[in-house]
């Protein structure tokens, strides 16, 4: 069983095999997540898809307090190491590593990546995580890309986190097509409503996915589900 908690935007906490994995923490600057207390969040690992502020804002404070291991691309781990993050594991696209909770594959995303101070952030990425009985895809920020078809060939994805707020990433239609290309029937939406550019028509999204016989979940911030 995997427990999944939503902290808004693209930030999720996965609890699996007794470990807590936090994705793309952007909580304190997000007014929609004002009821989430950062101090209550514990992470053994922080996985970061790319360097943009809306994916890394709370990395330093959580990593320092929890002694979390930062898992991201080489450039991002180096940038945070210089800022005092002690534990980190650098990866790059195409690579895999077995951690104590499961195996992580860093996969491609079509997006940009720079650090909050403007320095180079390497390539934006997504993650595929293979746990004991489940395989999960966290797409990060990305456009629809043919590379997603590789994921269907290599993995049997049980659950996928897909951005769908449009403007900076895929919108509803492309995210639905992505779910076909990765051959996954369980989707959790992310990267919507946080800013004016990415307001999601939730009814439209839900019915669009329904027509494709794909189960879309748009979690309320602070809620936890079991998968
Ligand atoms: Ni971004
Ligand atoms: Mn973003």
Image (spheres, rainbow, N blue to C red):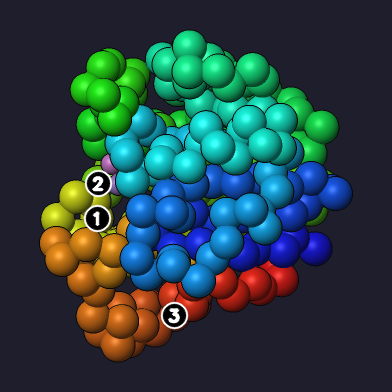
Give x and y (percent) for residue 30.
Answer: 36, 59
Mark found first going from the N terminus, 1 or 2: 2
Q: Is residue 5 visible?
A: yes
Residue 214 found in image quarter: bottom left
Q: Which mark is residue 143?
A: 2
Q: Which mark is residue 33?
A: none
Q: Judge by depth and name the residue closer to the eye, 156 or 189.
A: 189
Q: Where is 162 relative to 220, above or below?
A: above
Mark 1 or 3: the one toward you: 1
Q: Judge by depth and name the residue closer to the eye, 150 or 127.
A: 127
Query: How far, Cα to Cα, is label 1 from label 3?
Result: 19 Å
Where is mark 1, residue-wise? 170
For the C terminus, the quadrant is bottom right
Tag 2 and tag 3, C-beta contact below 8 Å: no
Q: Judge by depth and name the residue closer to the eye, 193 or 57.
A: 57
Query: How far, Cα to Cα, is label 1 from label 2?
Result: 5 Å
Where is mark 3, residue-wise? 213
Give x and y (percent) for residue 144.
Answer: 26, 48
Tag 1 and tag 2, C-beta contact below 8 Å: yes
Mark 2 or 3: the one toward you: 2
Give x and y (percent) for residue 17.
Answer: 84, 48
Q: Where is 172 relative to 208, above or below?
A: above
Query: How far, Cα to Cα, is label 2 from label 3?
Result: 22 Å
Which residue is painted at 59% across and 75% down in the image? 223
Tag 1 and tag 3, C-beta contact below 8 Å: no
Drawn side of residue 44 relative to residue 129, left or right: right
Give x and y (percent) for residue 110.
Answer: 27, 36
Drawn side of residue 103 relative to residue 184, left or right: right
């Amino acid at each position: 069983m995997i427990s999944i908690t939503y902290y808004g935007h693209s930030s999720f906490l996965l609890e699996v095999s007794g470990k807590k994995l936090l994705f793309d923490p952007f909580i304190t600057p997000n007014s929609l997540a004002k009821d989430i207390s950062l101090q209550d969040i514990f992470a053994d690992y922080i996985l970061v898809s790319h360097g943009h502020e809306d994916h890394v804002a709370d990395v330093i404070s959580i990593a320092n307090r929890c002694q979390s291991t930062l898992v991201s691309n080489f450039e991002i781990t180096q940038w945070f190491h210089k800022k005092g993050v002690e534990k980190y594991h650098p990866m790059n696209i195409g690579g895999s590593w077995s951690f104590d909770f499961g195996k992580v594959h860093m996969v491609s995303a079509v997006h940009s990546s720079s650090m909050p101070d403007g320095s180079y952030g390497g390539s934006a990425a997504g993650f595929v995580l293979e746990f004991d009985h489940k395989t999960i895809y966290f797409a990060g920020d990305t456009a629809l890309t043919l590379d997603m078809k590789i994921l269907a060939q290599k993995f049997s994805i049980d659950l996928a986190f897909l951005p769908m707020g449009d403007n900076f990433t895929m919108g509803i239609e492309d995210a639905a097509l992505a779910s076909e290309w990765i051959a996954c029937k369980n989707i959790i939406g992310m990267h919507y409503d946080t800013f004016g550019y990415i307001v999601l028509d939730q009814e439209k999204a839900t019915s669009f996915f329904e027509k494709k016989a794909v189960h879309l979940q748009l979690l309320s911030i602070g809620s936890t589900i079991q998968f």
